[in-house]
Image (cartoon, rainbow, N blue to C red):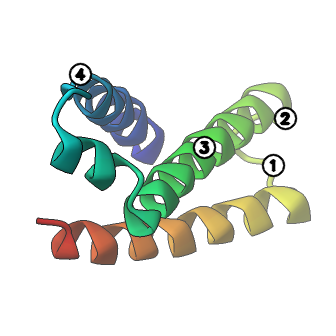
């Protein structure tokens, strides 16, 4: 379920951020804001982690959890909390 949410939300957000006009100096400066860059990097990492977990589940079955898979899910949860907190701060 989390994977579906991430896969649906991240591409739309990235498309929106890429569609911004670059001619405006303030828009260009905002696109290089370190907080925004970190937020985008975190969402990319979340997407990668969710795809890795999904692939492992497809390979091993949903009833088998490896330690590596559990660690990936924990990292995904931590990143989700960070991204959620940061999105609330972005104007």
Q: Quadrant of the C terminus?
A: bottom left
Are the residues tagged 1 and 2 within 8 Å (C-beta)? Answer: yes
Q: Position of residue 80 (x, y in %)?
A: 44, 65
Q: Which mark is residue 11?
A: none
Q: Quadrant of residue 27?
A: top left
- Please, what secondary structure does the residue beneath circle 3 have? helix
Pointers 2 and 3 in contact (CB under 8 A)? Answer: no
Residue at 41 percent of width and 68 percent of height: 35
Of 6 and 39, which appears nearest the observer? 39
User: Of label 2 and label 3, which has the lower sequence position?
Assistant: 3
Question: Position of 45 compared to 82: left or right?
Answer: right
Q: Nearer the viewer, mark 2 or mark 3?
A: 3
Secondary structure under tag 1 reads: loop
Q: Which residue has dot 2 on it?
A: 60
In front here: 13 or 73? 13
In the image, residue 78 above or below residue 57: below
> What residue is disc 3 on?
50
Secondary structure of the residue carrying numbered label 4? loop
Quarter of the rendering occupied by the N terminus: top left
Q: Which residue bears the numbered disc 1?
A: 64
Residue highlighted by disc 4: 19
Residue depicted at 32% across the width and 26% down the height: 18
Mark whose residue sits in front, 4 or 2: 4
Measure the C-alpha gap from mark 1 to mark 4.
Answer: 41 Å
In the image, 49 versus 57, the foreground residue is 49
Q: Mark 2 and mark 4 in contact (Cβ < 8 Å)?
A: no
Q: CA distance from mark 1 to mark 2?
A: 6 Å
Q: Secondary structure at mark 2?
A: helix
Is residue 56 toward the left or the right of residue 25 in the image?
right
């Amino acid at each position: 379920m989390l994977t579906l949410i991430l896969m649906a939300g991240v591409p739309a957000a990235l498309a929106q951020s890429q569609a911004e006009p670059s001619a405006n100096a303030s828009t260009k400066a905002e696109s290089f804001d370190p907080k925004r860059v970190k937020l985008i990097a975190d969402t990319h990492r979340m997407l990668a982690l969710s795809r890795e977990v999904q692939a492992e589940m497809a390979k091993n079955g949903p009833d088998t959890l490896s330690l590596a898979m559990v660690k990936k899910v924990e990292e995904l949860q931590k990143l989700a909390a960070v991204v959620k907190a940061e999105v609330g701060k972005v104007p």
